[in-house]
Image (cartoon, helix red, strand yellow):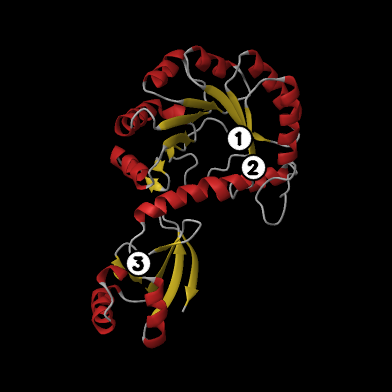
Amino acid sequence: MVLFVTGLCRRHCFYCPLSDKRAGKDLAYANERPVKSIRDILEEAKSMDALGTGITGGDPSLRFRRVLTYLRRLKQEFGPDHHVHMYCCGELSRSQLLRLKREGLDEIRFHTWSAEPVKLALEVGLNAGVEIPAIPGDYQRIVSLLTELEKIKCNFFNLNELEFSDTNLAQLRARGFELRSSTSMAVKGSEEEAIRVLRWSAKNTKLNIHYCPSALKDSVQLRNRLKRKAKNVARAHEAITPDGLLVKGVILNLPVEKLISVRSRLMRKHEIPADLIVIDRRRKRIEMHWRVAENLAKIERDLTFALVEAYPTYDGLETTLIPL
């Protein structure tokens, strides 16, 4: 589970991909679910059978007490085996790091160009490392950082492929960065820079280094999260695709006051089981199994049917609509 603690951050990294919806706003989300109470976090974790949680932001350290509360409740609810790692932009004090250690934080990942915050975290017994993007042209700077991290026996070092987003597009273009291809949001040259760093490190350090290509985020990480979530939240009228999305039929443009009567009529007339045709009160529409929608579209000419494909997430983002 991705636990977004706050959108606040004192840094202004030109490559920050955070959306306008979250950047600079003191809001919390568990995956796509807005967090109004601890219950929202626990329900979201249960809905996807989360084996662990990544605490992120913004900079979670700016809401340190909030982090401690969330961490404590996650460990209480799911036990010590529920792996929790935290991303951090700021420098935490020794006492803060000790609090995180006592509450059971399994791993801390610093977004930093200095070995000092990592050194302090290691001294209090935390599993600590660094995570930064592989920025083309930063090879020497990264190598210098790795040299310092090697001296303090840093636990790990993560390099992420740099990506374009809606919010960093202008900044990246202004610096001359380009898309790797027409089918990718990755920055041209980022992967090559990362591989160059990996090769140098293999020869010159004993550091545990990982490279995460942008494709991995969607094809593996997000896909697996959606599949876990879909298995738990899909209702009888929703079919699960191999990618973990939900497919169903809907009736479009139906007035709210007619939802109940139209559903009742269709159930009686066509002998449709109640769990295969339901009213979605949030979207104010009738939903049904996709096979039911395809059959009804042929005979109920006064109604407008479509198939939709949606994420199994709290916000139910719809990615496809096919009129029938």
Q: In this view, does 171 lie to the left or right of 125?
A: right
Where does label 1 land, which residue?
Answer: 13
Q: Earlier in the sequence, mark 3 or mark 2?
A: 2
Q: Give the residue type at disc 3.
A: His
Q: Give how far apart the Cα atoms at labels 3 and 2 are.
A: 36 Å
Q: Establish if 319 lies above or below 145.
A: below
What number is the disc on residue 213? 2
The residue labelled by disc 3 is: 237
Q: In which quarter of the image is residue 267?
A: bottom left
Name the front one of labels 3 and 1: 3
- The three-letter amino acid code for the residue at tag 2 is Pro
Secondary element at tag 1 = loop
Question: Residue 191 appears at what percent x and percent y?
Answer: 71, 40
Query: Is residue 168 shown to the viewer in this render?
Result: no
Measured in 3D between alpha carbons, the distance from the residue under mark 2 to the one under mark 1, in whole angstroms, is: 20 Å
Report x, y in % for residue 180: 72, 49
Res. 317 visible in picture: yes
